[in-house]
Amino acid sequence: MDRFSKVLTPEEADSLLITYNQNVKRETQSKYFEQEAKFLNFFNYAYKLNGETPVYVYCPDILDILRKVENPIIKFLDDKDIQLFDTLYENIKITDNLYKVDKELLQFFVKLSLRELCFSNFFFSNSDSVIIGNYELNFPIYCLNEDSMLIYEKKASEVGLFIRK
C-alpha cells in the first residue's frame, strides 16, 4: 500500500517523498499529516474488517525504545499518544515481541511505523492478512485469500491510497 500508483523514479522520489519531521515548514508537515490520516483511516477499516477483534503486532524494537530514559521519541507524540505509550509500557503483556492490541494501540503502532520511529508487522487474523510497516509511507500487504486483498484495494482507493501488485 502506497500513496503512489507506481514505483517512483529517483527524480520523482527526490521531489515527492515526505517524511515526518518536526523541524520542517508547516506546509510540509501539513502534507505529511494529510497522508498519515489516509493510512490511519485505512487501518481503522482493516480493524473493522477483522471483526474489531484484537490485532497482533510484532515489534521487536519497542522495548528498547521504551527503556530509554530521556527518550527522544516523546517529542514526536501528542499527549494522547504519550498516554498510550505509558499504557503499553506498564500494562501490555508480550510474548516474543508480539502484542495483542486494541484499536487505540493499533493506531499508536501505525503512527510509529508511519513516522519511521519503530516498524511493526500487523497481523489481522480474521481477514488472514498481514501489513508490514516500512519506509516512506509504504506498507506491503499480504493476504491468504484474494477476497481480503480485493476489499483492501477498494478501501485503499477510497481513501486515496494504492495497492500495487
Image: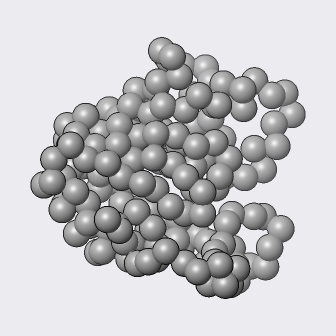
Q: Nearer the viewer, residue 74 or 154?
A: 154
Which residue ends up furthest to the right in the rendered image? 70
Q: Position of residue 154 (x, y in %)?
A: 22, 69
Where is the C terminus found, in terms of image quarters?
bottom left
Q: Residue at x 50, y 61 (%)?
A: 138
- Asked whether residue 86 appears in the rendered view, the answer is no
**Residue at the location (86% across, 34% down)?**
70
User: Which residue is at 39% across, 47% downward?
Assistant: 131
The residue sitting at the front extreme is 9
- Above or below, 74 against 92 in this view is below
Please state the total of marks drawn on the protein image.
Answer: 0
* Front-most of residues 140 and 27: 140
From what the image shows, is residue 38 above or below residue 95?
A: below
Image vertical order of residue 112 relative to residue 159, above or below: above
Q: Would residue 24 appear left or right of 43 to someone viewing this image?
A: right
Query: In the image, residue 93 lies at what x, y percent?
Result: 49, 16
Residue at horizontal 84%, vertical 27%?
69
Question: Where is residue 8 shown, x and y percent of the image?
Answer: 54, 78
Residue 68 rendering spot, x and y as whole percentages: 80, 28
